[in-house]
Image (spheres, rainbow, N blue to C red):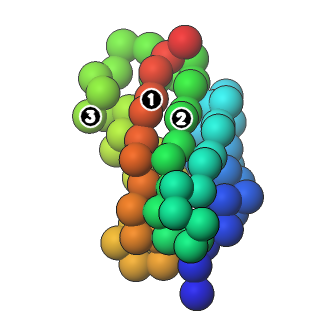
C-alpha cells in the first residue's frame, strides 16, 4: 500500500519539530514524492547529515512502502 503525503509530513515533523515540510507527489501513484524540508536545527550539519535525519524520521519506510523520495534540505 502506498504511503500518503500527509503521513510522510507527520513523520518528519514528529522527528524534526522545527521543520517546515512541503511534499509533492511526482507520479500520482503514492510511491514517488519530492520533499523540501527546511529546519533551523539543520544549521551546521552537512547535506548528508540533513538527509540522514529525514530518512531516519521515516522509520525505515524508504525502499519499502515509500519507493522514492527526491529530497531537498536546508537550514533556512
- The residue beneath circle 3 is 48
Residue at point 66%, 59% (across, down): 5
Q: In the rendered view of the protein, which quadrant contains the N terminus?
A: bottom right
Q: Which mark is residue 73?
A: 1
Q: Residues within 10 Å of mark 3 (few under 14, many from 20)?
A: few
**Depicted 4 relative to depicted 33: above or below:** below
How many discs mark residues in the rendered view?
3
Q: Which mark is residue 5?
A: none
Label 1, label 2: how far apart the Cα atoms are: 6 Å
**Depicted 58 relative to depicted 13: above or below:** below
Disc 2, SS? strand
Position of residue 13 in the picture relative to residue 41 (left or right): right
Q: Which mark is residue 36?
A: 2
Disc 1, SS? strand
Q: Residue 18's x, y, as percent?
A: 67, 28
Residue at point 48%, 78% (across, down): 65
Tell which tag, 1 or 3, sits nearer the viewer.
1
Disc 3, SS? helix
Residue at point 28%, 23% (across, down): 46
Report the residue that reaches farthest toward the front: 27
Q: Are marks 1 and 2 in contact (CB under 8 Å)?
A: yes
Amino acid at each position: 500500500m502506498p504511503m500518503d503525503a500527509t503521513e510522510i509530513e507527520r513523520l518528519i515533523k514528529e522527528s524534526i519539530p522545527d521543520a517546515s515540510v512541503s511534499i509533492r507527489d511526482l507520479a500520482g501513484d503514492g510511491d514517488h514524492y519530492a520533499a523540501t524540508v527546511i529546519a533551523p536545527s539543520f544549521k551546521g550539519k552537512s547535506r548528508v547529515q540533513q538527509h540522514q535525519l529525514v530518512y531516519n524520521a521515516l522509520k525505515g519506510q524508504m525502499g519499502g512502502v515509500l519507493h522514492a523520495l527526491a529530497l531537498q534540505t536546508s537550514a533556512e
